[in-house]
Amino acid sequence: MDYKAFKKNLTSRVEGLEPQIRDFLAFTAISTPAFYQNAGGVNLTMYDSTKSGLPKLVAQELQKAIPEGIGTTNTIKTNYGNFKVGYQYAFLTEDADKPLSPKTEDLLAHQLSRFMPACTETSISMFSSKDKPVTIEDAPCRLSDIPTVIPEETSILRSIPSIDPFDAFNFIIMNHYKAPIISDLSTSLTEVADNIEKLADDYALDPIQLTQYGFLNANYNARPTSVLRNSLSFARAQNVDIVTPEFTKKVFDDFFKWNFGYIYEIWEDLLAKPLVGKKTLASLRVKYRDIIRIIRKYSSSHLPGVNREDIIREAKTDPLETQQLLDECNTAGIVFQPVQGFYRLTRDDA
């Protein structure tokens, strides 16, 4: 079975899905290797355009293809002692409308979790009965790699047989043995951040969305890393060993950018409105003017941003206070980190 057949059969009973959403569902099963000091996996949150429980039904279709209890550690008793045996990948489903447990928050953030120590790859498919989150800061939307909406036209064709579990598991296992690598992490992260920044400009969105919030968080450990996860999963599916910046750009355009445009049509009121509780940037610039001055001074089109060490060296404050100011600037929507340790001003301050 190849990827095209797997994707088709995985959701063969689900009618009316957009092709890209079928890819998203397949990505959660194919998963990714562990990378960047985090666990592997692809997390998905599905919202419900009909408010009738469709995402939960779609998640149940995924469960038909993935063996129950996969990722559970079992103890094997032998004459030579007891041994713990477990598969490296786990697949979970969770209700996005309920308060998140510490376990779920850890797994959504792809942190190596004490709750599932044997698993180096964990994918979560979350389902909501709502058509949108209350705010773009809601954890399932903010932390999942792919927040999306199941279309109104979607239905489950119960008369059609589900994917053959043996064929599905065979395909999944074969792909979990593949370990594509990212050839140029810094360039890939920077280019994804550039493209996210352009999306925010194109839609005239509040630049604070590039820093700490929601769908367009351009910090290296937020949406750029999610795009890399989609790239690694798609690379497994396409038998690609090296994920180049060009490959990542294609994944960004075909999946992330498509999904944002699709979501924006449904969530325009949510994405376009100013964020609640935001202080005016004019008042913040006074407090952070030394940081802003240094970043402007050292900004270069040849670098992902201004190095933290350069900022700390030239700042008028001591190193600990300077780092605290940088963190506050990020929270306030003044700077973001396209690559770890490199800072860039949002457009209102550039």
Image (cartoon, rainbow, N blue to C red):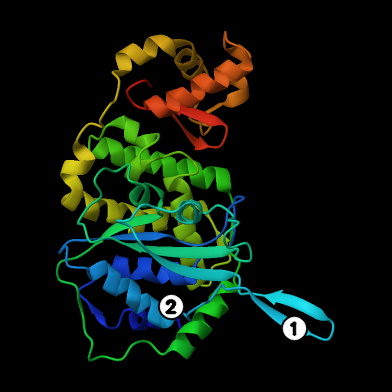
Tell which of 199 and 111 is nearer to you: 111
- The amino acid type of the residue labelled 1 equals Lys
The quarter of the picture where residue 120 lies is bottom right
> Does residue 30 lie above or below 2 as drawn?
above
Q: Which element type, helix, strand or loop, lies under badge 2?
A: helix
Label 1 Cα neighbours within 10 Å, binned few <14 / some 14-19 / many ≥20: few
Q: Is residue 95 visible?
A: yes
Answer few, some or many: residues within 10 Å of disc 2's Cα (few below 14, many 20 plus, some between 14 and 19). some
Answer whether residue 345 is visible to the viewer in this image. Answer: no
The residue nearer to you, when weighing 11 against 99, is 99
Q: Is residue 349 above or below residue 140?
A: above
Instruction: Work out whether mark 2 precedes mark 1 in sequence or the reverse, and give the earlier one.
Output: 2
| Kind of residue sitting beneath label 2 | Tyr
Residue 3's spot in the image, x, y percent?
A: 43, 78
Q: Position of residue 15 (x, y in %)?
A: 21, 78
**Residue 77 numbered mark, or none:** 1
Name the mark nearer the viewer: 2 or 1. 1
Cα distance between the residues tagged 2 and 1: 38 Å
- Residue ID for mark 2: 3
Corner quadrant of residue 83: bottom right
Q: Considering the image in quadrants, where does the C terminus appear? A: top left
Q: 160 or 111: which is nearer to us?
A: 111
**Position above or below: 346 against 79:** above
SS at mark 1?
strand
Q: Position of residue 94 (x, y in %)?
A: 38, 63
- The residue lying at 20 percent from left, 38 percent from top is 272
